[in-house]
Amino acid sequence: MVELKGVVKYYTRGRQQVEVLHGIDLSIADGDFVALMGPSGSGKTTLLNLIGGLDQPSAGSVEVAGRRLDALSGRGLARWRAANVGFVFQFYNLLPMLSAQRNVELPLLLTGLSGAERQRRALIALALVGLAARAKHRPGELSGGEEQRVAIARAVVSDPKLLVCDEPTGDLDRQTADEILSLLQRLNRDHGKTIVMVTHDPKAAEYATRQVHLDKGLLDGSVPA
Amino acid sequence: MKYLGLVLAGLLRHRSRSLLTFASVMTAFVLFGVLDGVRTVFSEGTDTSGQDRLIVTSRLSIIEPLPYSQLARIAAIDGVQQIAHANWFGGVYQDRKNFFPNIAVSADEWLAIHPEITLTAAERDAFLTTRTAALAGENLVDRFGWKVGERIPLEGTIFPNKSGSNSWTFDLVGVMRSGQDEGSGFANELIFRYDYFDEGRTQGQGTVGWYVVRIADPARSNDVAQAIDALFRNSDAETKTQSEKEFNLAFAKQFGDIGLIVSAIMAAVFFTVLLVTGNTMAQGVRERAGDIAILKTLGFSGVTVCLLIVTESLLLLLAGGCAGLGLAALGLPALSRALRGQLPPLEVSVDTWLIGLAIMLVLGLVVGVPPAVRALRLRIVDALARA
């Protein structure tokens, strides 16, 4: 599913170039649930952004779902993301003026589906995360855990093969975090989603099938969970 | 249409700010609708075609008198059916703020050439037989509480009388009812007999302010107008013949170039709207950088996001602008009524709507494009890191 070879990423800060990733080689198989761990500043989110097609490597190749992302244009990457990846963030990133259902529908606006069909699929996705009854509620009317469920529903509504999750439980209490992680685990086991999850939390990492450690822009090696 | 919800969500994210901006746009366009209605009245067409009444004034200025001797020569021109004459008096009733037009007219001819003035037979007879007689418009009578039979004193500001004072007294013998709506100017005028005025004044005897000419065939109005002016070309009193409407507008323009004043006010108003709306849009997009980054993350292209923001801006301007012009359209008839016929009926014309829509579109693009370009250039990872 994911194949990274010799991936280097640097940012330009003023006149300085800061190299964040120093030649990463990484393979993630279809159906894996990978926890990407490491200290702050180790390059976890940068690596996740490259896998999710949000950013381009400075060198090396990134191939996801059979597509070389480093060769795509900005518009090509946008189209690819819409069709292949679902995103879950630490702070949910829902649009506050839209109801849960309308938030979930957002990725479907880019398809040719009718309004009724978009609505139907959004409600199915919300039912999958146990929030069908809160479809008309706005994010401000939901708890943190519920907001994250809506974000997960939005991530899966267009049925992508890959989910990238950046600290999905970082803003939640333990019990709610466990519920969210169980939900992700279910999506991985029952629905075959490949999941790459950045986390600091060793307990969260236990839900994954594989852990990958990153330190100072280098992989430590893969450790089976 | 499927993106409309997103556009509205963007606009309503900061509801109070958007409402205030909407209100300022609406206010600007109310002002535009009203002022453009006034400007239109002051700058309507100059073609005399189709008018059955022409006004002959001095070519130099409408305040320059013309010799009475021209009357017979104008009346003899082919196509001229009737002729009357008048002179601006400029008298003040009690206080200068009580301004209204008061005019010395050739009594019989004046009534004949203005059949829209409705009088009873007794009022008409009294006006034609009483040298000091005056007729007042119905609005004036209401305004000052005058009664028929009352003596109306006016203080002359231009013409002293032979008794050595500026005081002139007239006998109100009737009320002019136009029989039409507020469009008629008679409702606010006072007219009295020219013979009484001409004999009583100490200067300018034998001159008139302007002639009113009724023509037999309105289709020939341009020809007749040109024939009158040609008759007096290179004389001591060259004339300028124009339609009645054009004359009224020229008279009003003595107070200033209304078009220029209106344009200057509107330029200032729209510049302010540009700043207010531009600030709202820029601030709104800056605050929504996280939302925009999410849309891009989900696969919305930069161009789509750009178009969403420009649409927001256009929608704000169009909603506020149309509401403003709509209010102006509703309010102008009331303003016309309040002016009691001092101006022709005011309205928001089709031209004003079209100009207004063009201004809304231009302003919408000018304020929408810069933040849209900023959104286009927004890097997802930077915006997400800041969110």
Image: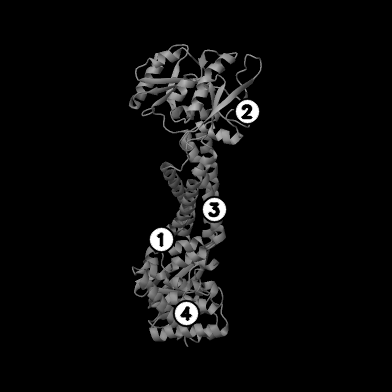
The mark lying in front, picked from 2 and 1, is 2
Q: Earlier in the sequence, mark 3 or mark 1?
A: 3
The mark lying in front, picked from 4 and 2, is 2
**Circle 2 marks a residue in which chain?**
B
Spatial separation of the CA atoms under disc 3 and disc 1 = 28 Å
Q: Please name whichever residue, A149 or B8, is drawn nearer the observer in this view of the structure.
A: B8
- Residue A133: give its label: 4
Spatial separation of the CA atoms under disc 2 and disc 3 = 43 Å
Query: Do the residues indicated by labels 4 and 2 lie within the same chain of the protein?
Result: no
Q: Position of residue A27 (x, y in %)?
A: 40, 79
Farthest front residue in view: B122
Residue type, label 1 = Thr
**Circle 4 marks a residue in which chain?**
A
Q: Please name whichever residue, A166 or A3, is drawn nearer the observer in this view of the structure.
A: A166
Residue type, label 4 = Ala
Q: Residue under circle 3? A: B23
The reply to whether callout 2 and callout 3 are in contact (CB within 8 Å) is no
Which residue is at 33% across, 27% downward? B219
The mark lying in front, picked from 2 and 3, is 2
**Circle 1 marks a residue in which chain?**
B
Spatial separation of the CA atoms under disc 2 and disc 1 = 68 Å
The mark lying in front, picked from 4 and 1, is 4
Residue B142 visible (yes or no): yes
Q: Secondary structure at mark 3?
A: helix
Q: Residue under circle 1? A: B304
